[in-house]
Every structure is written in structure tokens, then in C-alpha cells.
Image: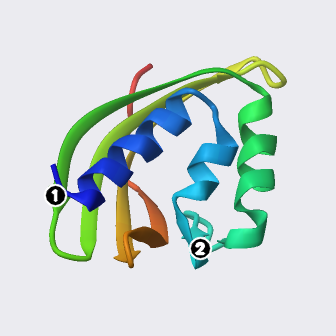
Amino acid sequence: MNQNQIIIQQAIKACIDKNAVTFASLFAENGEIILNNNRKILKPEIAKVTADYFANLAYINIEIKNISVAENKALIDWTWQDYNTLTGKQNCQDNVISIHFTSGLISSWQENKVLSQLLC
């Protein structure tokens, strides 16, 4: 397993464990997350924004469908499931995550929803 594959596995585990600090630590100083609504979250905000999101979730389940890793890029095809205790709603979404790496860390994490409808 190469360094980029290790980072991907650590990121997935951090999400499932709802560990925003660990998740944020995997990003380069100029790293960013780009969400479906084109909202950019820059490195200084990643831990706080992620922690705020995780705070209301009872659980996160991630089913990996495919991971494709090239030299400095990766694509993850997964199904994300969570339960929001604040809203009382379960979320289930197929996503493709596009990741770029710089110097062994994530420089860009872009989330793209797949347009299929899932039944959770």
C-alpha cells in the first residue's frame, strides 16, 4: 500500500470515527475541501467545520465501491450513510470523491454526488 492509499484509509476511518481533528490533519497547509454546492473549506477551517457536521450524527457508515489511485490523484466511489440526531433523518448518498495529493498530504478533496436515488 502506498502513502496515498494509506491517507485514503485514514480519511475513511476518521470519517467513520467522527474524528475531525485526524481528518483535518491529513490535509496540506493549502488543502481544501470542495462540497457539492461548490462551498470551499480551507485548511484552517476543516477541523471546525467537520467537527460541527459530525457533532449531530449518531453514526457514519461508508461502503466503498471502488478506489482508484494514480500518482497524485485518487477517486473514491462510496455510499455514505448517517443519522442526524438533530433532524431525526437518515442520509444516504452515493458520492465520488476526487482527491489530489501534494507532498504526501491531501491538497484537494472534492465531493460529487452521484445522481442515482438510493433507498436507505
* Position in image of residue 74 (x %, y %): 26, 65
Nearer to the camera, 10 or 38: 10
- Please identify the quarter of the rendering in which residue 38 is found: bottom right
Residue 56 seen in the figure? yes
The label number, if any, that marks residue 4 in the structure image? none
Q: Residue at x 58, y 49 (%)?
A: 23
Looking at the image, tell me whether mark 2 or mark 1 is earlier in sequence order.
2
Q: Which residue is mark 1?
A: 68
**Real-space CA distance between mark 2 and mark 1, rounded to the nearest whole angstrom:** 20 Å
Q: Amino acid at mark 2?
A: Glu
Residue 116 seen in the figure? no
68 relative position to 61: left or right: left
Picture mark count: 2
User: Would you call the spot at circle 2 few (<14 residues within 10 Å), some (14-19), or many (20 or more)?
Assistant: many
The C terminus - image quarter: top left
Nearer to the camera, 111 or 88: 111
33 relative position to 92: left or right: right
Secondary structure found at label 1: strand
Q: Amino acid at mark 1?
A: Ser
Q: Residue at x 16, y 57 (%)?
A: 68
* Position in image of residue 13 (x %, y %): 45, 34
Secondary structure found at label 2: strand
User: Would you call the spot at circle 1 few (<14 residues within 10 Å), some (14-19), or many (20 or more)?
Assistant: few
Q: Which residue is mark 2?
A: 32
Q: Residue at x 27, y 36 (%)?
A: 64
